[in-house]
Amino acid sequence: MPVPLPRPPALLKGLVAIVLAVAFAAQAVAALLPHVPLLLAATAVSLATEGALFRWQRGVLSLFAKSHADITVRHVLRDLLLVVALLRLGEQDRETVYAPLVAGLLAFYVLHCAIQAVSVLVRRTRTLPVVTRNIDASALRLSPAPSVLLRRPGHRLLVFGLPATAGLLAAAPGDRPVYAAAGIALSLTLALTGLGALSLRLLPGRRPAGEQEVLEWFDGWLAAYRPTVGLYFSGGASSAYQANMWLEPLAKLDGRPVIVLRERFMVQKIAATDIPIVCLPKVSTLMRLEHSTLQVLIHPSNSGKTSQVLRIPTIKHAFVNHGESDKLSSCNPYAKAYDEVWVAGPAARERYALAEVGVEDKDVVETGRPQLDGVTPYAGPPAGAWTTVLYAPTWEGWDGNPGNTSIVEAGENLVRALLADPGVRLLYKPHPLTGSVDPRAGAADLRIRELIRAANRERAGARPPAGAELTDRTAELDRLTTSVFRTGADTVERMLVQSAPEPGRAEAVARATAAWEEAYWAALPEGEHQVITDARPALYPCFNVSDLLISDVSSVISDFLASGKPYAVANTSGLPEDAFRTAFPTVAAATVLTPDAAGVPDLLETVRHPEKDGLAEARAALKLRLLGPAEPSSQERFDEAVRALCTEARDHRVRVAERLAAELPGQRTGTAVPTAPR
């Protein structure tokens, strides 16, 4: 088996590290000889490489830090070698001349350490126990973040220390210590100015509110806003889509919604919304929700921190998931920890019963999938010259099951078969996590993209520039959905910028998104295949322009059934087709494709000629089974489920209050759970 070559980024990192090491070695040799031209060249290369590291190769910085050769060590070594070189030049009493300069240089490094210590204190004062968005937090004395130079030691040392290093370097050729003195003096001035600027941030009137003041403010906001239903989410940066898909259904609910997060970075990962967002990193802060009017939390995913919020007895919890499929992850035993499990249709109810994971049937509520109300229904065979096929494979998963994704064993065959049909326009939308576990999946994904690029070169030649309409729509949508922050803004500054949404912003985003999607599809060259990996267009707009879906056993199938259009599933599980259909009920109305993609031509024929499609009735029946009835709408059923669980939460609070009053009469004054709004 051939040994894989290092990736270009790894080679570049190694090259940069070697250049910096050679530069320091050359500087040491030049200082000991001494050799002024070599000293100048080596120091210049060393400084230039440092600048390149901070601008383009941050990963190498962590590598040096792990080797105990961080920026401070490197900067001190660079200046030390320059001092050694100056002391070895000439015959006069060098120590007497350069001793004050060395003292000044040491003073600069002492100031550098002092700035770092003060910056840590400032950062602590700006690490609030609650992070918010879409909430007026002006009472917390929020302010812009200090300059990046004052907060990051690497940037600060490079900039503030550069005059001293340059002065020492300039002093070497002509043995002129005045240059070194001037450079060190400038560095000292910069350091003193920075220390003063940071110290002012610690004054009582210049720092944000303290922890207790913030918590009291948060309690006051909860009492004033009186939230009724919320979305709870915790996860990694790439999982934000799981929460974002529930924003619109949540916003349409009756009541006062709120989004509860646990990770500070996630505040900016939540898409544009008018809903108030609160991030409560600490468990002790999270527990303050117990005495609020919040009645129901919906959970799109399970996480390690979910168990913490489930401890709050005054809130009812519903697991809504971020998609339903036949995979075991769609009936996780963790679901029994919730008060209710909300599913799309009868199939999921049956799935939980068969899985025997402890979820009782009485706790399963069928709500449909509110996100799918915007998926357009089947309107007949392709009307134009092109049959648009969406290939949306899922990722490889954690368990190593070859049936999880088709991309490894069947992906290239499927794409080749589709590209071989001159009437097909292919939309390829891989899962964002493709290749994150199995490198073979990532490699197959890259090969598929190259196949598509090659097909486009043969079909249409060079891609024309985007039209003015799409450019304008993109700019408008970016303006509405992207918060512009100053470089180096921290969470406090972002809270200040995002203190309140523009009135009607959510509706404006919805209109702008629809206009962008229309302009996007119209701007594409006719018949050009697409690799879609950006956040826009999302999956459901791809459903609406597609005539056929090819995917794997995943929630994509269940969602696509809302359209009623034909779909196919690649069988890479190793099971015979009959066993495959039995094992995965969502495949019941699908065309099953083998890894060699031999059935693709016949599949396309049934799409173009509906009279040959023998699965239309099966799709309609499966849609009803998976997603539930069309009337009432999913949003209405979702709203009704929220109201019912809120009622149960209120009744539970009343019963608990009555029981406590009966058990300990007169001793519960002031401790009763607040009455929740109806």
Image: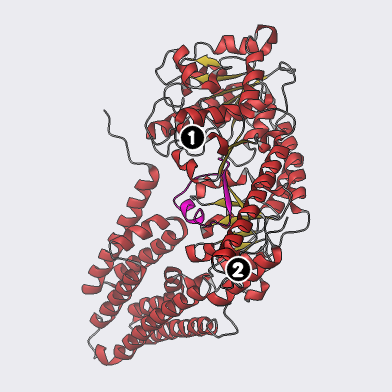
Q: Read off the residue under disc 2.
A: 493
Residue nearest the observer in this picture, 395 or 250? 250
Badges 1 and 2: C-beta atoms under 8 Å apart? no
Q: Quadrant of residue 158?
A: bottom left
Q: Please indicate, yes or no, whether residue 27 appears anywhere in the rendered image.
A: yes
Residue nearest the observer in this picture, 556 or 122? 556
**Circle 2 residues within 10 Å: few <14, some 14–19, many ≥20:** some
Question: SS at mark 2?
Answer: helix
Residue 128 position (above or below residue 587): below
Left or right, 509 with respect to 653, comes to right
Residue shown at the point (52%, 15%) measured from the top left: 592
Query: Considering only order in the chain, which callout, 2 or 1, is on the residue closer to the N terminus?
Result: 1
Q: Position of residue 124 (x, y in %)?
A: 48, 74
Tell me the chief SS of the magenta region: loop
Amino acid at dot 2: Glu
Residue 283, disc: none
Residue shown at the point (27%, 34%) measured from the top left: 3
- Tell me the mark number nearer the camera, choosing from 1 and 2: 1
Residue shown at the point (54%, 56%) measured from the top left: 313
Q: Position of residue 451 (x, y in %)?
A: 51, 25
Question: Which residues fall within the magenta stretch?
Answer: 299-321
Amino acid at dot 1: Cys
Question: SS at mark 1?
Answer: helix
Residue nearest the observer in this picture, 240 or 344? 344
Q: Read off the residue under disc 1.
A: 331
Residue 312 highlighted magenta (yes or no): yes
